[in-house]
Image (cartoon, rainbow, N blue to C red):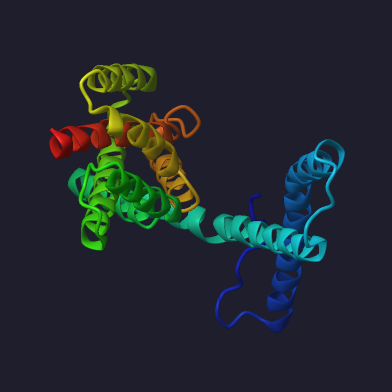
């Protein structure tokens, strides 16, 4: 949801600030209503199978209702925060780098953004620790805290590095005007080739890594970077050229993690 309320400048009259607060509150209520509509199908499906198929009452219905309300409020606040902070910030920084005209700094910013946001992804952290636990149980690594932590950290850094490299490639694609389908087809062709020689125990982890990297933190900033950069470059369309970075950021972790497995497991 795009915000229509402009933040009043410092020293603005009290009436302007009051109107801004009112508009922001109304937009937040609209966002809460939209989040409720989005979550309603999930609630209906769970309740139907619990009551009609399993024929069991909902356990701790009061706590479930409270949890659903918290999820609804959290989702609404998250989406509202994206619309007024992360999206404008990412687009503004991409535009500033484009105006500055330094490709080197733009590539450095894209890599740092991809690396930092991916390393901070909670879903990636959870998957990395679970992969380390399962690898230790299967005898692939030593079954102690130090080995599991080192494995999880190495996996997270590998995925973060791969997303940073994907954003550099994506920014180069926007600057050069390269067609996205050829990059995607070539990338997945390379993924299939590496899959044939990768250790079996790392393949599933690698393919899952491509999904967990594009989550709550990475997607908004990466999307804003692509759209802002394409909008700031003459001859580029934000709709045609601005999107596609997420596709590359989902592809490269699969390849990098399989190479990580080849190096680690031999």
The residue depicted at 29 percent of the width and 34 percent of the height is 202
Total marks shown come to: 0
Whether 168 is drawn above or below 112: the answer is above
Which sits in the foreground, 228 or 62?
A: 62
Q: Position of residue 250 (x, y in %)?
A: 39, 35
Which of the two residues, 238 or 124, is positioned nearer the viewer here? 124
Can the viewer see residue 100?
Answer: no
In this picture, residue 64 sits left or right of residue 227: right
x then y, percent, for residue 215: 48, 47
- Quarter of the image where the C terminus is located: top left
Residue 115, horizontal then vertical, whole percent = 29, 51
207 versus 76 height, above or below = above
Asked if one can make out residue 81 in the rendered structure from this viewpoint, the answer is yes
Q: Depth check: give the residue in front, 169 or 57.
A: 57
Where residue 13 sits in the image (x, y, percent)? 67, 82
Q: Residue at x 62, y 64 (%)?
A: 6
Q: Residue at x 23, y 28 (%)?
A: 199
Q: Residue at x 70, y 83 (%)?
A: 14
């Amino acid at each position: 949801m795009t915000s229509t309320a402009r933040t009043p400048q410092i020293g603005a009259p009290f009436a302007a600030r009051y109107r801004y607060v009112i508009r922001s509150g109304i937009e937040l209520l609209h966002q809460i209503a939209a989040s409720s509509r989005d979550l309603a199908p999930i609630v209906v499906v769970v309740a139907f199978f619990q009551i009609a198929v399993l024929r069991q009452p909902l356990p701790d219905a009061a706590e479930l209702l409270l949890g659903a309300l918290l999820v609804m409020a959290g989702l609404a606040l998250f989406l509202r925060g994206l619309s007024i902070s992360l999206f404008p910030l990412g687009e503004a920084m991409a535009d500033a780098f484009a105006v500055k005209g330094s490709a080197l700094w733009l590539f450095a910013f894209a890599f740092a953004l991809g690396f930092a946001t991916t390393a901070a992804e909670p879903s990636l952290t959870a998957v990395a620790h679970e992969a380390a636990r399962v690898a230790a149980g299967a005898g692939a690594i030593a079954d102690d805290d130090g080995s599991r932590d080192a494995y999880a950290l190495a996996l997270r850094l590998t995925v973060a590095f791969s997303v940073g490299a994907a954003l550099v490639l994506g920014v180069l694609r926007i600057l050069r005007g390269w067609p996205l389908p050829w990059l995607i087809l070539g990338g997945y062709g390379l993924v299939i080739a590496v899959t044939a020689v990768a250790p079996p125990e790392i393949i599933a982890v690698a393919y899952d890594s491509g999904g967990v990297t594009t989550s709550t933190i990475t997607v908004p900033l990466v999307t804003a970077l692509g759209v802002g950069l394409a909008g700031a470059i003459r001859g580029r369309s934000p709709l045609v050229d601005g999107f596609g970075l997420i596709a590359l950021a989902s592809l490269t972790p699969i390849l990098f993690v399989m190479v990580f497995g080849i190096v680690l497991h031999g």
